[in-house]
Image (cartoon, rainbow, N blue to C red):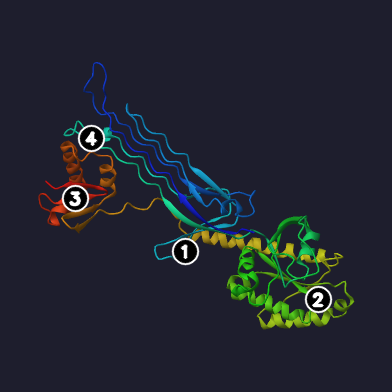
């Protein structure tokens, strides 16, 4: 099962603005009419119930979104790039790394609302935008903004109401196949199930999703027996069913081990509601030791702070006790649903809405280099990229833009002198 994947997303860059002038039969010296570039396409991630894994992204992990079209003459604006929606299973977490290599959560996909993960660049201005009373012949146009480059880490945690937890070969697959239409592999040897299995259960007038988590071993919280991968999926469940093997030497030891692994993996997992059921009551040996096994399990539960634990018995093969188990599950689900609604109401009352958007433009910077200065300015770099710096008229217009942005003053304060080289992006011009 593919439940983790890295995505490299390149949002579409904006189209370049156009440098153009009106030339008609009776208007040979018409004004500027260069259009703006179109906006680049953005990338969104959306939940889709038709997907169960991230397999469709595993081998298509680099995604390029369409860029915006370039502007044209006659004030024609380039077309906008088409945005792209990436569908993922419900329950997918989106992580991103910061500059220090620390990952932070961007979004938790639990519905069909698209989440913006990479924003397309804005289109560059055409030369029409630079017309002013003192500049009737603008020879400058902007390059389109570069689209966002995002490296994302997707992690799938399956959504289920009930999680079946047990040691290997305790009867989880038999139970979920009896309660639902799920058809997991059933055999008489350990680790028959190697990936989570989901099934929809209808019982006592309620429908809920049951998930079988592959068998857990002691040390699962540390990754033994792929425990990390299995327990990650169990995090979403609202209620846990601990299935104990009635033929084990000490079923109470299994109960203690499962609870310890949950708490060591995450404290929140250890606090979730539990149903404890001992399987294989159809075996005489298990039936005859019900009271003894119940007492030992309740003693272990009391040691862990649970004084009122009910222990159920069932046979996943014959169906004995399964109806009572499902009734207990429905009861706990109804209780947790009410508690969840109350918690969400409190959270909505105290939490402020989070605003997502494009990061702020980087500040202009001046750096001393051999023979001159290097200028870091997104606005100027976008202008110079399309400019013919050999034309003195262009240099005068660039000088005007440097004055407007305050870069000319910064250069003067840094001690620039006539003839010094100014490096803007890949272009070099001389200070005059």
Q: Nearer the viewer, mark 3 or mark 2?
A: 3
Q: From the viewer's perspective, is residue 23 above or below residue 91?
A: above
Residue in the image at 35% along x and 33% along y? 71
Q: From the viewer's perspective, is residue 167 above or below residue 76?
A: below
- The residue identified by callout 3 is 422
Q: Nearer the viewer, residue 211 or 196?
A: 196
Q: Would residue 312 be found to the left or right of residue 122 on screen?
A: right
**Gap between marks 4 and 1 measured at Cα:** 45 Å
Q: Nearer the viewer, mark 1 or mark 2?
A: 1
User: Is residue 356 among the parts visible in the rendering?
Assistant: no
**Gap between marks 3 and 2 measured at Cα:** 81 Å
Decide: few, some or many residues near mark 2? Use Cα within 10 Å; few <14, some 14-19, many ≥20.
many
**Which type of secondary structure does the marked residue at label 1 adopt?**
strand
Residue in the image at 63% along x and 77% along y? 219
- The residue identified by callout 2 is 246
Q: Nearer the viewer, mark 3 or mark 4?
A: 3
Which badge, 3 or 2, is on the more N-terminal residue? 2
User: Is residue 6 among the parts visible in the rendering?
Assistant: yes
**Gap between marks 3 and 1 measured at Cα:** 38 Å
Q: Position of residue 70 (x, y in %)?
A: 37, 35
**Which type of secondary structure does the marked residue at label 3 adopt?**
strand
Q: Nearer the viewer, residue 84 or 90?
A: 84
The total number of labels drawn is: 4
């Amino acid at each position: 099962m593919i439940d983790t994947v890295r995505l490299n997303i390149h949002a579409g860059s904006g189209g370049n603005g156009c440098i153009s002038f009106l030339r008609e039969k009776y208007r040979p010296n018409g004004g500027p009419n260069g259009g703006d570039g179109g906006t680049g396409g953005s990338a969104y991630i959306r939940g889709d119930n038709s997907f169960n894994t991230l397999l469709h992204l595993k081998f298509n992990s680099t995604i390029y979104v369409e860029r915006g079209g370039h502007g044209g003459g006659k004030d024609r604006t380039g077309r906008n790039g088409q945005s792209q929606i990436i569908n993922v299973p419900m329950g997918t977490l989106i992580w991103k790394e910061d500059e220090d290599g620390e990952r932070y959560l961007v979004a938790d996909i639990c519905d069909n609302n698209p989440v913006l993960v990479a924003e397309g660049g804005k289109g560059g201005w055409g030369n029409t935008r630079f017309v002013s009373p003192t500049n009737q012949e603008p020879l400058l146009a902007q390059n389109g903004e570069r689209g966002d480059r995002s490296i994302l880490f997707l992690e799938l945690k399956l959504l289920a109401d009930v999680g079946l937890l047990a040691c290997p070969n305790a009867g989880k697959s038999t139970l979920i196949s009896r309660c639902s239409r799920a058809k997991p592999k059933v055999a008489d040897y350990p680790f028959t199930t190697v990936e989570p299995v989901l099934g929809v259960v209808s019982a006592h007038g309620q429908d809920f999703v049951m998930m079988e988590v592959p068998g857990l071993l002691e040390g699962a919280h540390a990754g033994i027996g792929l425990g990390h991968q299995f327990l990650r999926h169990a995090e979403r469940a609202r209620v846990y069913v601990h299935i104990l093997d009635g033929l084990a030497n000490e079923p109470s030891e299994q109960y203690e081990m499962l609870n310890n692994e949950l708490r060591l993996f995450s404290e929140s997992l250890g606090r979730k509601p539990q149903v404890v059921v001992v399987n294989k009551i159809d075996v005489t040996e298990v039936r005859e030791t019900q009271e003894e096994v119940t007492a030992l399990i309740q003693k272990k539960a009391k040691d862990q702070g649970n004084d009122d634990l009910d222990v159920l018995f069932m046979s996943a093969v014959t169906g004995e006790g399964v109806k009572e188990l499902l009734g207990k599950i429905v009861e706990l689900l109804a209780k947790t649903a009410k508690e969840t609604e109350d918690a969400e109401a409190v959270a909505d009352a105290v939490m402020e809405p989070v605003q997502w958007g494009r990061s702020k433009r980087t500040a202009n910077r001046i750096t001393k280099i051999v023979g001159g200065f290097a200028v870091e300015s997104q606005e100027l770099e976008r202008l110079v990229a399309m400019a013919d710096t050999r034309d003195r008229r262009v240099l005068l217009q660039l000088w005007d833009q440097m004055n407007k942005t305050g870069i000319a003053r910064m250069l003067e304060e840094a001690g620039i002198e006539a003839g010094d080289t100014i490096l803007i992006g890949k272009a070099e011009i001389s200070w005059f």
